[in-house]
Amino acid sequence: MTSPTQSSTPHIQEKLSVCPLDCPDTCSLKVTVTDNEITKIRGSHVNPLTEGSICTKVARYYPDFVHGPKRLRHPLLRTGPRGSEQYQQISWDDALQRVHQGLDNAIKTYGPESVMPLNYGGPHGKLAGGSMDVRFFERLGATQLNRAPLCGGVRSLAYRSMYGSTAPGLPPQQAEFADLILIWGCNVSVANLHFMRTIKRARAKGAKLVVIDPHKTQVARQADLFLQVTPGSDVSLALYLTAQLAAKGCVDKKALDEYCTGLHTYLEHAASYADTDIQSTCGVSADDAEQLIELLEQANSITLNVGVGLERTRNGGAACRAAYSFPLLFGTPGAVGNGVIGSYGSIFPSNDQLTDSGYRSSHTPREFNIIEVADHLLDTEKETPVKAVFIYNHNPIATHPDQQKLIRALSQEELFIVGCDVEMNDSMKYADVILPAATHFEHNEAFSAYGHGYLQRADAVIPLVGEALPNTEIFRKLATIFGFKDSVFQDQDEDLLTQAFKLDKETHGISSIHELPVDEALCLQNAEYRWLTDAVLTTPSGKAELYSESLQEEYQAGLPLYQSITQDAPFQLISPASDKRTNATFGGNPASDGLQLLEIHPQDAEKLNISDNETLIVSNKNGEVQLQAKITEAVAIGVVCCDKGAWCHTSPTGLTVNALISNTSKTDIGDGAAYYDTFVDIRKA
């Protein structure tokens, strides 16, 4: 018989996992499990790139995310007004029948395109991020979403337009051997943490670090040179620098003929920016620009790390393309450490079978730009209006532009809304039926990455919490209720894992992801790979294209071009990544409670008679938010900064800075959200 002392002894285990959040690092994790609950999370050394360290937010906030009071443990039925958080617990059978009835009613009345999935990149695991769910909505014939414009799509399109879709970026560890590391629009200390270690090693070998950003981030404070550029003007700065360096004979035109097309046209275009007043246009002094010119002139190998911050203006695509040209034009193609960080998707041998519903229809469903979903939901005059929405892997109210418009759209009582998530967040509060989703800690999963070339696998480390189910099982059950008898809807998770990647023994050392131990990460990119020279470019010319025919045809943007941005209020608002949240994930943690900080320059604060920590009302025609002043020179005069991803309860107005951002202001290519083309008034509360 077990004694009372023995029975009270906790059962503690150390298990391995992987971080699934929307971040380039995809860290390997060591998880402490006490009596089937996660009590501690640290970094593991399984992924050699992440080297046993993780960001503070994952270590501090993930256990609460899995087990805390906001965790959704049971299916729920709305009993009060939308947004009131009034729900009652129901059974899974009841919940699934109600979902079937709601979607089926819309389909019978208006057709399958009246149903719209509203999802993004909550978990980046291959199964939870897009497998059985994609099959389900394809088989249903639902409206599809173009998700790229919300984040990262413009940057990716810019890269593809120049280097094609199969030329991966520089192995990030190779940056250690660069002469110059250029960080442009990326707060790597928050959004690409482990690159900081690479920077440290590179600088120990003599590399110079340059940061171009409107916000003086931690990495900017450590840089040899920091250029605090005006948001939206980066393309002018890049073309000015190109013109100056070309005039000094720093572009080897003869050598570059082997690697690129459109060079003469590009340099001729850049020359028209040679006389740009970069102080007034870009906020950068001529002396700082000259220092950067000298560093570029001296560098044999340039590592460029471009963040999503660079794409978030009307000139976002142009800025990314102009920046992407630097290692090509001013570095040495084929040199170790010379190239662009990013674009690793082609390294992972993904398998279309994972998302194939097996159903072929003569009709291609319509597709909406994800940042315009509020407009489509509010447009009741459409021939086929959207009448049912399925929100999962996403918290759109916390992440989309024009927050008030989206709230109005989701408040419509005639709309049937299904929510499926881990926590009760801002968006779940509008759902008619809520389905509790499992975290990746509760099911087996596989992970590619978009910041490196390591493939990883993880097993469940805890049992399912409450009645939560993995996304895959939820959509399998829905497929059954809808009568989808196709064999693809019978696939279990182990089948889906097998289908996730096309692996073969000769090339990868394993023939299935199941053969990859959880204590190993499989490197799919040779560390000796030389950017550009070792790649087969899938551009029309087979070379890097400085002039893009396809972008010219679709967007009249064959060359990167600066377009002026109309300022209709005194201050330009930027909203970069937070060290407390990954996008909106962890926004429900108490660490994110209270008024969010608005960084404002001392001179602007003095003009407005604002004191540190004072409550401010930040507004424009789209909305009004209360924030707390933080007076700092981390922002330039006329620019203010508030981190993205906060939840609505943080302001007495019930809104966040996303309410101030228009969903009609678009980027020059890719129809992306121009988050930083936001201008606001500020007054004391």
Image: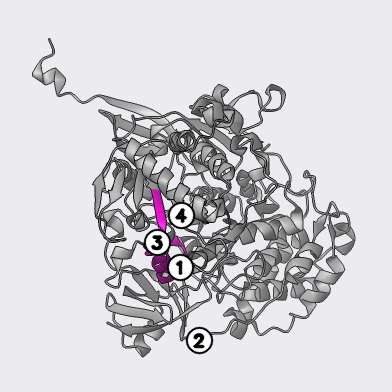
Q: Earlier in the sequence, mark 4 or mark 1?
A: 4
Q: Which residue is mark 4?
A: 388
Q: Mark 3 packing: few (<14 Cα in 10 Å), some, or many (20+)?
A: few
Q: Which residue is mark 2?
A: 568
Q: Which residue is mark 1?
A: 575
- In percent of width and height, residue 205 lies at 60, 50
Kindly report the distance in space between the C-alpha atoms of the residues bearing marks 3 and 2.
Answer: 36 Å
* Secondary structure type for disc 2: loop
State which mark lies toward you, 3 or 2: 3
Q: Mark 2 packing: few (<14 Cα in 10 Å), some, or many (20+)?
A: few
Q: Is residue 577 above or below residue 50?
A: below
Q: Is residue 484 magenta?
A: no
What are the residue bounds of the magenta stretch?
A: 399-419
Quarter of the image with the C terminus is bottom left
Q: Is residue 401 magenta?
A: yes
Residue lying at 54% horizontally and 65% vertically, measured from the top left:
372
Q: Earlier in the sequence, mark 1 or mark 2?
A: 2
Q: Amino acid at mark 3?
A: Glu
Q: Amino acid at mark 2?
A: Asp
- In percent of width and height, residue 233 lies at 61, 76
